[in-house]
Amino acid sequence: MDATQYDAYIERMRETEYPMLKDATYLDHAGTTLYSKSLLEAFTADMLGNLYGNPHSASQASQRSTHQVQDVRLQLLRFFDANPDDFDLVFVANATAGIKLVADALREHDSGFWYGYHRDAHTSLVGVRELAKEHHCFAEDEEVEDWIRNGGQDTQTRLGLFAYPAQSNMNGRRLPLDWCGRLRNKGMLTLLDAAALISTSPLSLADLDTAPDFTVLSLYKIFGFPDLGALIVRKDAAWALQKRRYFGGGTVDMVVSLKEQWHAVKSTHLHEQLEDGTLPVHSIIALKSAISVHHDLFGTLERISEHTSLLAGRLYSSLKSLRHGNDEPVCQIYKDKASTYSDRSTQGPVVAFNLCDAKGHMVSNLEVEKLAHVRNISIRTGGLCNPGGIQSALDLSPWQMKKNFSSGQRCGSENDDVINGQPTGMIRASLGAMSTIKDVDTFVSFVKEFFLEEASDTPYKRTDSPLLSLDVPVSEQLHIESLTVYPIKSCAGWQVPANTSWEVQPQGLAWDREWCIIHSGTSVALSQKKYPRMALLRPILDFSAGLLRITCAVPIKDATTTEISVPLSADPRCFTSSSKTSTPTNVCGDNVAARVYSCPKISSFLSSVLGVPCTLARFPASFASRHAKAHLSTSNSKTSTPLAFSNESPVLCISRMSVNALNKTIKAKGGTAVPASTFRANIVVSQPLHLPPGTETPYVEDSWTSLAITDKRGGAGQQNDGSKADFKVLGKCRRCHMLCVDQQTAETRQEPFVTLAKTRREDGKVWFGVHLALSKGEKKGWVRVGDQVTAM
Ligand SMILES: *Cc1c(COP(=O)(O)O)cnc(C)c1O
């Protein structure tokens, strides 16, 4: 089979073996490989056809397990060309556990150990330094080379261990494998982290002169299943692990506990001394199926290596060649200077990069992820568990990283990843055994579609609110079209009746986000982004009954009730008694003390609607910033000064004109218009109906700085029940793919986010609508549908 035929073969195989890849572009293979259908079938057949016992007795079932484990251990050694006379294999939970096992054993040596590690090390390798007496991070290959040439100084006094990844989990760069042999000759122990390498490359330990002392790997990165790791140890380096002090069931032959303390560690095989407790027998047995199915599907790792290398070359050169209209590059790629995509010994099938706009400004990876999500593309973004690699590729100094940490940046959090114009993480696209040319091309078109700016100017220009030659500019003839409160965060809105004056407080419209739904296990407030079905929960503020009623828009399976309610008053009897005060919950990353409802009927109703164990909670009156402030823009994105949030929380306002303009664009491309409710605003403002064509002013809100609301009948404060509220504009509202949830059906679709991302992106972020808060000093305001809105 030539390369094209092999690619077509994988493409066909995906349909039968990997149904989860249907319509999906999975570019996160360095994390884990997907398991195949044949593998699970083979494993199931094995489990159903044979009785396997705990391998500690003489029963047939027990012996069968023991033999299988022995066989698999040997098969795995052979998988890496490791001669069982020279190597032993220790089963561990994952690569990290293998690394930790080595470090734990070395620290027991008399004067501890010296530890050297390469800049490209995975976090799990870096952590070993905390157990070492002395340690050093090598910043460059040349530094390692010099050090080897000079005979490994620093380490004369004590045992030394040098560790590095065979392939960087950040950018896929493959490091020289000859360091191990050369360092052995200098009396240094070596630990090779092969976890990232072996998913797409063979690793041979056949040559004893060059093989590392310790090799760790994650087996799930090759086979997808089972979740196991392995530590392969050279038998002539076994002494280094034998000082380990702990023993457990399985690792000793005899233990005396009474009157005298004595034990004898097992001595036949090294693995017996290191595998504490019962082995994960069924997982190990599953490896038998994994190795054989992997062979049937792909042939060899060499074959996978060739194929993925071809794809990576295509991805790299396509991304590299993307240029904006003004010839600025679209991608900033983090390739190591020592690697070449055409040379598999220096580069694995991974491309790490950031996207830039036409002005050379970095695009936030959060935005990239949101759009990738909509298009069913899986990529990895962030710090990628590779601190040294990130620090050097992004040229971040320790003080910057610490500063970013204190300003809230956390691994895996949703915080902004571009701080002061500098990226703090990157995007990683990694290819695996079942990736195809089509995946690569889909991803490249995706980048082109959303991030390549054809014209030299940005796709979205600030609106200069076009004032029209009427007596009063149309942009000033605004009124409130509708008012909506969202009593429960992330659930459906409740329309304020047309003839009702509604109170505005410093924290927002009265009754807005007064409640939330929290996960019963983690107490984290649920969001529609992850649980679209929240849109089906329709809260009703029933003032005559004094209740918040919660209904569901669709029939609920097995439900005993169609509606639940809680008193609008904060009746203390409704809440869990165990938490006399309140339960710490987490809302959009902030810790908040909310009170949790104790009634089982409430949690069972909500849990059956959402399909997740959850319950209702009420915010304390003092919790003001309960809106989705993560989406609040900064007043000036250039300086990225966060807005002060002390005691105010925004009201979200959109204009009918902008909704109309957006829908026009969506429809022009054959899409379906979306209702204004999609944007989950509190206030929708509108211009007079029946304006002459072309006189609407979409996006006029972008330039507002304040809004005055007055009663259309009287004007400011003329009647007691008259409306009056002065708002300041806090900033534009940053949008995410939550817009793709149809608020009626809870189905997800691509619009309006896709069109917004193409037409309303500025500084790498997507904007629609504005956040408001009562003007400084104002304690209260009143608004009503139909009120006149004067914008400044
Ligand atoms: C994935 C990975 C690890 C960690 O592996 P676990 O199995 O999660 O412990 C360590 N190093 C590299 C290079 C990796 O890619």
Image (cartoon, rainbow, N blue to C red):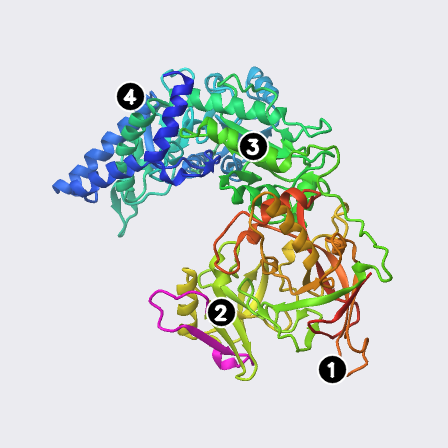
The percent coordinates of residue 62 (x first, y second) are 17, 41
Proximity of marks 3 and 2: CB atoms separated by less than 8 Å: no
Dot 4 lies on which element? Answer: loop
Structural distance between the alpha carbons of marks 3 and 2 = 43 Å
Residue 616: image tag: 2
Quadrant of the frame with the C terminus: bottom right
Q: Nearer the viewer, mark 3 or mark 2?
A: 3
The percent coordinates of residue 606 (x first, y second) are 44, 67
Q: Main secondary structure of the magenta part?
A: loop
Amino acid type at image mark 4? Asp
Structural distance between the alpha carbons of marks 2 and 1 = 34 Å
Residue at the spot of label 1? 721
Dot 2 lies on which element? Answer: strand
Amino acid type at image mark 1? Asp
Q: Nearer the viewer, mark 1 or mark 4?
A: 1
Region of the chain picked out in magenta, as a range: 552-574
The percent coordinates of residue 339 (x first, y second) are 56, 20
Quadrant of the frame with the N terminus: top left
Q: Is residue 159 visible?
A: no
Residue 571 magenta-highlighted: yes
Residue at the spot of label 3? 445
Q: Is the residue indicated by label 3 positioned so its CB lies within 8 Å of ligand 1?
A: no
| Closest to the observer, 397 or 747 | 747
Q: Nearer the viewer, mark 2 or mark 4?
A: 2
Amino acid type at image mark 2? Leu
Residue at the spot of label 4? 85
